[in-house]
Amino acid sequence: MAKRKLKEHRINRKWCKGCGICVRFCPKKVLELDLEEKAHAVRPEECVVCRLCEMRCPDLAIEVVEEEADAAAS
C-alpha cells in the first residue's frame, strides 16, 4: 500500500471557532492557532494524513485532502 501524501489542509476560517482541539490532537504539531485564534497549518510537510484534526473538529472546519494516487505506479 502506498504511503498517503497530503495535498492540502482546507480550513474554513468562518466555521473555525478557535477551540484548539485540532492543535492538541495533531501528533506532528502541524497545526497552530494564529493571531485571530483560527487553525492554521504551519508545518504541512510534517503531516502524516492521520485525519485526527478532521475527525475531532466539532465544527467540521477542517478537511484533509490527499494527493491522488498515481495510476501508473503499481
Image: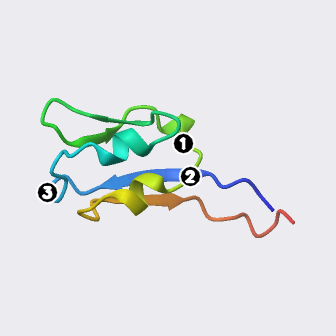
Distance between the alpha carbons at the discs numbered 1 and 2: 6 Å
Q: Is residue 71 left or right of residue 34?
A: right
Distance between the alpha carbons at the discs numbered 2 and 3: 23 Å
Q: Quadrant of residue 72?
A: bottom right
Residue that sits furthest to the top in the current view: 35
Of callouts 3 and 1, the N-terminal one: 3
**Image spot of residue 68 (x, y percent):** 62, 64
Look at the image and tell me whether residue 33 can be seen: yes
State the residue position of label 2. 49
* Viewer-closest of 71 and 62: 62
For mark 2, give the secondary structure. loop
Look at the image and tell me whether residue 63 can be seen: no
Residue that sits furthest to the right in the current view: 74
| Residue at left offset 73%, top offset 53% | 3
For mark 3, give the secondary structure. loop
Q: Amino acid at mark 3?
A: Lys
Of callouts 2 and 3, the N-terminal one: 3
* Viewer-closest of 73 and 4: 4
Q: Residues within 10 Å of mark 2 (few under 14, many from 20)?
A: many
| Mark sitting on residue 47 | 1
Quarter containing the C terminus: bottom right
* Image marks 1 and 2: residues in contact by CB distance under 8 Å: yes
For mark 1, give the secondary structure. loop
In the depicted structure, whether residue 19 falls above or below residue 65: above
Q: Quadrant of residue 42?
A: top left
**Image spot of residue 12 (x, y percent):** 24, 57
State the residue position of label 3. 14
Distance between the alpha carbons at the discs numbered 3 and 1: 23 Å
